[in-house]
């Protein structure tokens, strides 16, 4: 019965991967039915298991499946045929090709470390695979401000620790606390603003920028959050790259060099690098009209403060 629900459509591997990805979203795996579908897809679509993106998705889902096995809910899962129909004409690329370990686990030792009081005035609570957390991490690394990193696992049977929820009831990273916990910033853009005001390192302090440079920084931050993030997501999930390539060429024309806004590193570089680096990893930024972005990425990877934030396992931004 379950096999017949998916086989008649004759979906390709790419189509089934899109189906698999959506099926494993939290809203679709809140019941034992969702777990059953996961297991059946593994059993009946063995060709999926040879695909690295599928292995990544399965790995990412293991903690959730373990949790769901302890539940006794019978709420229905959304229609299988409608999901397949949604992805039947959509080309799904090789998602997270280099994301070899989509989630981290926290050992008992690191759990103790996380709960211990730190001597640093600035605390950075993060998950190192998140691009939004990475841009805050770059800002901190390049600011010269002493800080401690407290990494949390966003998924897993143990859940997020109580102290984390107290700092940010939304349950998201990154979070930065300053002056003990007198100042709490639970949004990556707010963190950039706060760090930019007090930087003492390679990151140029906002007040030291000219009015024109500040305008450039604001423009870069806007284009990353309001254009590149949604356009990049659409390109990766939908497989259509022309709009993304067009945007990259537009951004290429904005690069002053060697950093985005000129000779000095600014918050624009912090905001842009995690997103453009991920696109480069899977799709390459090296075509005609993308040369300045290519050179900028090289400069970033030669900048120690940025290089320290690059990890082998990473997520996209959704």
Image (cartoon, rainbow, N blue to C red):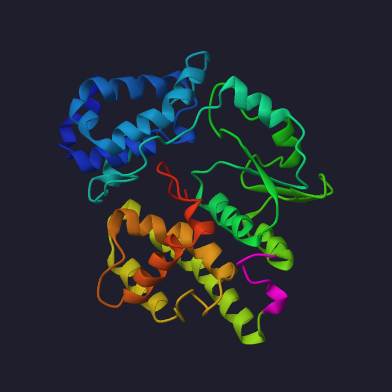
Corner quadrant of residue 248: bottom left
Q: Position of residue 200 (x, y in %)?
A: 70, 65
- Assess whether residue 136 is covered by the magenta stretch: no
Query: Image quarter for residue 291?
Result: bottom left
Is residue 109 visible to the viewer in this orientation of the structure? yes
Using the image as rendered, state which of residue 239 and residue 314 is in the foreground. 314
The correct choice, above or below, for 191 with respect to 78 in the image is below
Q: What are the residue bounds of the magenta stretch?
A: 200-208
Magenta stretch, overall SS: loop
Task: Point out the residue furthest to the right here.
Answer: 182
Residue 124 lies, with reference to residue 247, above or below; the image says above
Q: What residue lies at 53% left-to-right and 73% top-to-bottom? A: 220
Drawn side of residue 40 relative to residue 267, left or right: left
Q: Position of residue 262 (x, y in %)?
A: 51, 80
Residue 81 is at least partly visible in this image: no
Which residue occupies the foreground of this view, 43 or 213? Answer: 213
Give above or below for 216 relative to 145: below
Image-based side of 13 in relation to 286, left or right? left
Q: Is residue 87 left or right of residue 271?
A: left
């Amino acid at each position: 019965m379950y096999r017949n629900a998916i086989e008649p459509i004759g979906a390709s591997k790419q189509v089934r991967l899109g189906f698999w990805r959506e099926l494993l979203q939290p809203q679709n795996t809140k019941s034992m039915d969702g777990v059953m579908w996961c297991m059946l897809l593994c059993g009946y679509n063995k060709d999926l298991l040879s695909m690295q993106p599928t292995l990544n998705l399965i790995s990412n889902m293991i903690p959730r499946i373990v949790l769901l096995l302890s539940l006794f809910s019978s709420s229905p899962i959304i229609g299988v045929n409608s999901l397949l129909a949604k992805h039947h004409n959509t080309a799904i690329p090789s998602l997270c090709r280099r994301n070899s370990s989509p989630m981290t686990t926290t050992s008992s030792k690191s759990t103790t470390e996380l709960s211990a009081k730190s001597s640093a005035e600035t605390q950075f609570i993060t998950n190192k695979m998140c691009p939004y957390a990475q841009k805050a991490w770059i800002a901190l690394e390049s600011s010269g401000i002493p800080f401690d990193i407290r990494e949390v696992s966003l998924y897993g049977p143990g859940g997020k620790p109580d102290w984390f929820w107290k700092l940010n009831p939304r349950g998201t990273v990154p979070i930065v606390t300053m002056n003990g916990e007198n100042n709490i910033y639970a949004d990556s853009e707010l963190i950039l603003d706060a760090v930019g005001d007090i930087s003492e390192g390679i990151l140029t302090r906002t007040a030291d920028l000219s009015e024109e440079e500040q305008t450039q920084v604001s423009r870069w931050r806007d284009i990353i959050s309001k254009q590149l993030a949604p356009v990049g997501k659409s390109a990766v999930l939908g497989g259509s790259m022309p709009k993304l390539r067009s945007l990259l060429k537009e951004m290429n024309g904005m690069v002053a060099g060697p950093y985005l806004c000129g000779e000095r590193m600014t918050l624009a570089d912090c905001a842009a690098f995690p997103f453009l680096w991920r696109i480069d990893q899977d799709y390459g930024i090296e075509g005609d009209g993308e040369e300045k972005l290519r050179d900028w990425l090289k400069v970033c990877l030669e900048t120690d403060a940025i290089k320290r934030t690059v990890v082998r396992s990473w997520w996209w931004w959704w």
